[in-house]
Image (cartoon, helix red, strand yellow):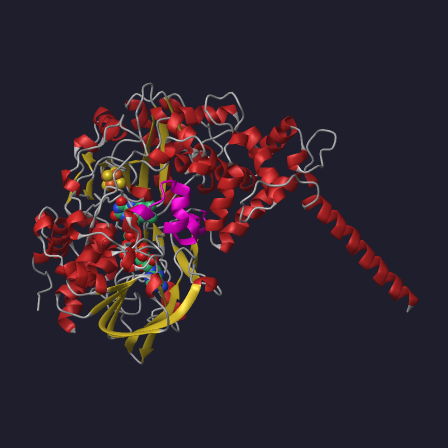
């Protein structure tokens, strides 16, 4: 009887220690995230910024560097728009990279620390090790992470504008669809288009390749889009 | 009554748009009355019609229009919302979360491959590149001999291709909007002595914005939401959007209608996004929910129309591979028709070559490296072109399975070694084309191989047995055969008129009825089959 009470205490004690360790590893000590995030928690924000710093560093010719590209905001926006299953998959990917050092420590003192707590050189080493891993499925994890972040990074208005790849400025056409349907989520009454508003696509000239780009890409900040 | 070939389309002449100013607004007010959008639903819905068409993609939209034009009372049901130009999202990644199933992140299992299916009024036509190709007779010959089909050949289908071509203004892409990245492909083909041609597209007045994927802001692309769906409304059809059909109701060998729920736009069709119930009684049901959705719907309806055991089976794709080539001078790839040039020179060998463009952040996802190296690749984008090959992979088979508690399917599919060999060969040909056009290097995007190649000889490695399915970065947006057409009811789901062998009045009109992949872009063929089917059904009702 005493033995089983003791065992129960041991199990509960071990579970408590594990829970505290888990809490400290996964949630404690992260800086406060920027305001306005819908999905990401502070640990994910820290990871995204830490990865962005080494994936998209300074001095490579693009106007915006990774840490200034508002990637947490972008990823948060992306995740909020995804169905739950896909959202979970991407969050699992972020968590995996943040804590991969538990099983594969970085080769520096404190190598078991979270990815976001490592110095830049150690973070690069961790990512390089995964990206060149002999197992293809592990390498693909890196490709997936890079994809999630590069969508926001290269998609930053200032970067696209600098490369001449921002969408063109185009006067929105009015087709039968605009005449017939309201905007998504709105009531039909909100559609004020008249038949006379309809534009004829065949009367519009090809775009000028050097022509103006969409005004949302002329401003420098992602927040202004 | 119309004959099976159908007549001209009196209410949709090309000059219709030009005459807009003189048109009466009466049709508009009446047509608006026949549209239902999410914000209007405030309780359970009960409707009745001659025919309910499920899905407003290219096949469903054509079917709805032809049936309405034949005087039938038609309800076209669509799960997605209608998009107006102002609803388009310019960021390709965020756009996918609104227009695509599973946020654009759907993957096959077995051989992993991304595959996209749209959820919007207009289905795939809203986001596709508008490429229209008639399959050669050889494709139909294979269909006829392998699947006991007697009337599914070019001669029988050409009138339907023609009618759709005239309706949508399908025509070769003019040089003025090709842009350099498309014309370089033409030059490359010339240099290697390969045939090539401007791609014919369902487009009127393309301006070369290269943004077909996120929605044509110029409304030049004749996607279904600007063409066949409005025409169906003018012909008297009703269009109900944001309705997810969850079951086909039936009694014995007769379908009696469909039922399901209203879904909140962009909620992914999940349970939390469902609101009111709806049900629609009809004398005939046409399922055009798309090749991956229709089998799920049939399974959820008590494994309907599946005495053959073929529902969901025989899944085929046109897996595609692409290479980016870097040129010494500016290519200005942002300008030009999204996909403007193609070569059919290798169709007999099993692949078709095309030019390709997409929002740059999506294209760059496959760039190798990180840090300064990765950023250097981005900096090369203005000098880049991307060319792709799609493969008629009719040996690579899979299955659409039902996912518990979900309307989303699980797609199992495996690339067959012989189709892999075709993909390798296609990669090598694309590489040769780039060097023939003067590219200084290519980014083949094949895992485990050189990240960039600067000489044609290096590219030979791409056509070696060392390239395995897992090395390839493929995509497969053309999907087929999961409710295939077969003359023998024990081996196929529908007959040549698209009618389910097991039911008197249940039809399937999407690319799932193709008996084999067509080896060319499928939209036009799907529409031609749907048109024939709708005219036959109209005569039967
Ligand atoms: C990015 C991309 C580019 C492409 N480019 C080309 C091209 O240039 N040329 C070409 O020939 N092909 C192209 N394709 C393929 C082509 O778009 C498809 O083959 C075509 O759209 C298939 O038409 P469909 O009518 O069979 O189905 P879909 O277009 O998939 O339409 C099915 C519709 O049914 C709706 N639906 C599904 N389930 C339900 C339900 N339960 N209740 C109510 N509604 C439902 C869907 O929301 C959808 O709108 C492309 C595809 C993609 C994704
Ligand atoms: S290239 Fe641009 S203008 Fe032309 S059809 Fe596509 S989206 Fe429209």
> x and y percent of residue B500 in the render?
27, 69
- Left or right: residue A24 compared with residue B326: right
Please report the residue visible at 41 percent of the width from the left and 35 percent of the height from the top.
Answer: B361
Q: Is residue B62 above or below residue A210?
A: below
> x and y percent of residue B522 in the render?
26, 50
- Left or right: residue A138 compared with residue B179: right
> x and y percent of residue B326 in the render?
36, 24
Indicate the quadrant containing the N terminus of chain B: top left, top right, bottom left or bottom right: bottom left
- Farthest bottom residue in view: B252
Q: Nearer the viewer, residue B71 or A131?
A: B71
> x and y percent of residue B134 in the render?
18, 47
Picture quadrant of residue B301: bottom left
Please report the residue visible at 52 percent of the width from the left and 31 percent of the height from the top.
Answer: A68
Q: Nearer the viewer, residue B42 or B439?
A: B42
Q: Nearer the viewer, residue A23 or B450?
A: A23
- Farthest top residue in view: B328
Q: Is residue B52 magenta?
A: no
Q: Is residue A22 above or below residue A157?
A: below
Q: Nearer the viewer, residue A101 or A139?
A: A101
Q: Do we see residue B85 in this rendering?
A: yes
Picture quadrant of residue A52: top right
Q: Do we see residue B110 in this rendering?
A: no
Number of on-image labels: 0
Picture quadrant of residue A116: top right
Please report the residue visible at 13 percent of the width from the left and 69 percent of the height from the top.
Answer: B71
Residue stretch rendered in magenta on the structure: B86-112
Q: Is residue B111 magenta?
A: yes
Indicate the quadrant containing the C terminus of chain B: top left, top right, bottom left or bottom right: bottom left
Q: Is residue A211 above or below residue B522?
A: above
């Amino acid at each position: 009887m005493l033995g089983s009470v003791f065992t129960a205490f041991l199990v509960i004690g071990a579970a408590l220690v594990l829970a505290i360790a888990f809490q400290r590893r996964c949630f404690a000590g992260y800086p406060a995230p920027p305001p306005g995030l819908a999905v990401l928690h502070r640990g994910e924000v820290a990871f995204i910024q830490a990865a962005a710093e080494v994936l998209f560093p300074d001095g490579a010719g693009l106007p915006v560097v990774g840490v200034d590209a508002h990637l947490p905001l972008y990823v948060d926006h992306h995740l909020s728009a995804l169905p739950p299953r896909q959202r979970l998959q991407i969050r699992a990917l972020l968590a995996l990279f943040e804590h991969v050092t538990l099983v594969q420590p970085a080769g520096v003192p404190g190598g078991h620390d979270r990815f976001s707590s490592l110095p830049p050189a150690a973070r690069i080493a961790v990512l390089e090790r995964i990206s060149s891993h002999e197992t293809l499925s592990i390498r693909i994890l890196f490709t997936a992470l890079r994809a999630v972040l590069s969508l926001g990074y290269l998609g930053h208005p200032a970067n696209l504008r600098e490369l001449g790849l921002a969408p063109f400025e185009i006067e929105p056409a009015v087709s039968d669809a605009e005449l017939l349907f309201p905007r998504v989520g709105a009531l039909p009454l909100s559609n004020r288009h008249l038949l006379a508003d309809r534009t004829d696509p065949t009367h519009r000239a090809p775009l000028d390749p050097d022509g103006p780009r969409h005004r949302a890409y002329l401003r420098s900040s992602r927040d202004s889009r | 009554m119309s004959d099976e070939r159908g007549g001209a389309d009196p209410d949709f002449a090309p000059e219709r748009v030009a005459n807009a100013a003189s048109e009466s607004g009466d049709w508009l007010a009446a047509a608006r009355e026949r549209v239902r959008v999410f914000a209007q639903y405030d309780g359970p819905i009960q409707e009745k019609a001659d025919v309910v068409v499920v899905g407003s993609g290219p096949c469903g939209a054509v079917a709805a229009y032809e049936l309405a034009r034949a005087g039938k009372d038609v309800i076209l049901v669509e799960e997605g919302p209608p998009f107006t130009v102002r609803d388009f999202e310019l960021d390709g990644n965020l756009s996918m979360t609104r227009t695509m199933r599973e946020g654009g992140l759907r993957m096959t299992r077995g051989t992993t491959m991304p595959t996209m299916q749209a959820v919007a009024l207009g289905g795939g036509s809203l986001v596709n590149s508008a490429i229209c190709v008639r399959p050669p007779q050889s494709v139909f010959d294979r269909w006829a001999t392998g699947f006991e089909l007697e009337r599914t050949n070019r001669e029988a289908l050409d009138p339907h291709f023609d009618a759709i071509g005239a309706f949508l203004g399908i025509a070769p892409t003019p040089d003025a909007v090709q842009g350099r990245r498309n014309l370089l492909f033409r030059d490359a083909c010339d240099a290697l002595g390969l045939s090539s041609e401007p791609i014919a597209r369902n487009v009127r007045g393309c301006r070369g914005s290269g943004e077909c994927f996120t929605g044509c802001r110029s409304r030049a692309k004749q996607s279904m939401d600007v063409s066949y769906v409005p025409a169906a409304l003018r012909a008297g059809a009703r269009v109900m959007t944001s309705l997810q059909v969850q079951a086909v109701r039936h009694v014995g060998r007769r379908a009696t209608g469909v039922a399901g729920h209203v879904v909140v736009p962009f909620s992914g069709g999940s349970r939390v996004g469902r609101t009111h119930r709806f049900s629609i009684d009809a004398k005939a049901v046409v399922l055009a929910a798309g090749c991956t959705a229709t089998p799920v719907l049939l399974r959820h309806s008590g494994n309907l129309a599946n005495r053959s055991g073929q529902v969901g089976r025989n899944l085929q794709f046109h897996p595609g591979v692409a290479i980016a080539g870097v040129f010494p001078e500016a290519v200005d790839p942002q300008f030009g028709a999204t996909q403007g040039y193609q070569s059919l020179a290798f169709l007999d060998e099993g692949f078709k070559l095309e030019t390709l463009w997409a929002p740059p952040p999506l294209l760059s996802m496959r760039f190798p490296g990180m840090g300064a190296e990765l950023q250097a690749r981005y900096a090369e984008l203005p000098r880049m072109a991307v060319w792709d090959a799609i493969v008629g992979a009719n040996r690579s088979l899979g299955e659409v399975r039902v996912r518990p508690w979900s309307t989303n399917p699980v797609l199992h599919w495996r690339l067959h070694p012989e189709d892999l060999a075709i993909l390798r060969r296609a990669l090598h040909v694309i590489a040769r084309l780039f060097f023939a056009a003067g590219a200084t290097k290519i980014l083949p995007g094949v895992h485990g191989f050189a990240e960039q190649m600067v000489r044609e000889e290096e590219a030979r490695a791409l056509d070696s047995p060392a390239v395995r399915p897992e090395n390839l970065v493929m995509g497969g947006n053309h999907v087929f055969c999961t409710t295939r057409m077969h003359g023998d009811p024990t081996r196929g789901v529908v007959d040549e008129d698209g009618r389910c062998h097991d039911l008197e009045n249940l039809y399937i009109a999407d690319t799932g009825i193709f008996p084999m992949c067509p080896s060319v872009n499928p939209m036009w063929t799907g529409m031609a089959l749907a048109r024939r089917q709708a005219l036959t059904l109209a005569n039967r009702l």
